[in-house]
Amino acid sequence: MRAQFLVFTFLATVLASSASAQQAASPPPRTFMNNKEIMGLIDKAKADRKGDAPLVAEPILSLAPYRAQLEYRPAKAPAALHEKDAELMVVLEGAGDIVTGGKLADEKRTNANNLSGSSITGGNSQAVVKGDMLIVPANTPHQVIPTGGAPIVLMTLHVPHPPTNWPPAN
């Protein structure tokens, strides 16, 4: 009887550990999304917007450590600075100004790797429209400002800073 109890306890522990591991596992990588699905994400972002939130983000693709996301920006959002990664931006819809460089106004830390501010002083403004793209280097303040009375929609991709010896010599 004692042996049966031990076997039962062992099996219950293994099953519980397996179920727990499956729940903790991250979703599988997504490496492709077609245009129709991306346009659907814009509708989802509009629906997900809470009140007058200046930014709604929806995931597009994911393959660790990379994550592409759709950013629906109907209003001016705070400026940001990412200390450990660059940010690639592609304008999917709308128009706006992207301010880079300068200094964050009213700077505050949002987490271990990011700072935010109410705006940027002394930065450079670049007018952007659908199809334009730019990359913001790590440690560079940046702010997206929609223009023309309509939201700007971006695809953004954070690119972690490469190791010191990158790229390798061929």
Image: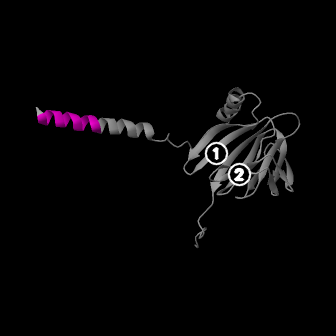
Quadrant of the rendered image containing residue 58: top right
Please give the label number shown on residue 68: 1
Quadrant of the rendered image containing residue 2: top left
| Magenta stretch, overall SS | helix
| Image location (x, y in percent) of residue 78 | 77, 44
Q: From what the image shows, is residue 127 above or below residue 76? A: below
**Side of 142 relative to 60 (left or right):** right
Q: From what the image shows, is residue 65 above or below residue 154? A: below
Colour scheme used in the picture?
A: one colour
Residue 71 visible in the displayed image: yes
Residue at 22%, 35% in the rendered image: 9
Helix, strand or loop under label 1: strand
Q: How far apart are marks 1 and 2 (CA)?
A: 20 Å
Residue at 30%, 35% in the rendered image: 15
Mark 1: amino acid: Ala
Q: Does the magenta stretch include residue 48?
A: no
Task: For the residues labelled 1 and 2, say whether their Cβ atoms are less than 8 Å apart.
Answer: no
Residue named by callout 2 = 115
Mark 2: amino acid: Leu
Pick the residue in front: 83 or 111: 111
Q: Give the range drawn in magenta.
A: 2-13
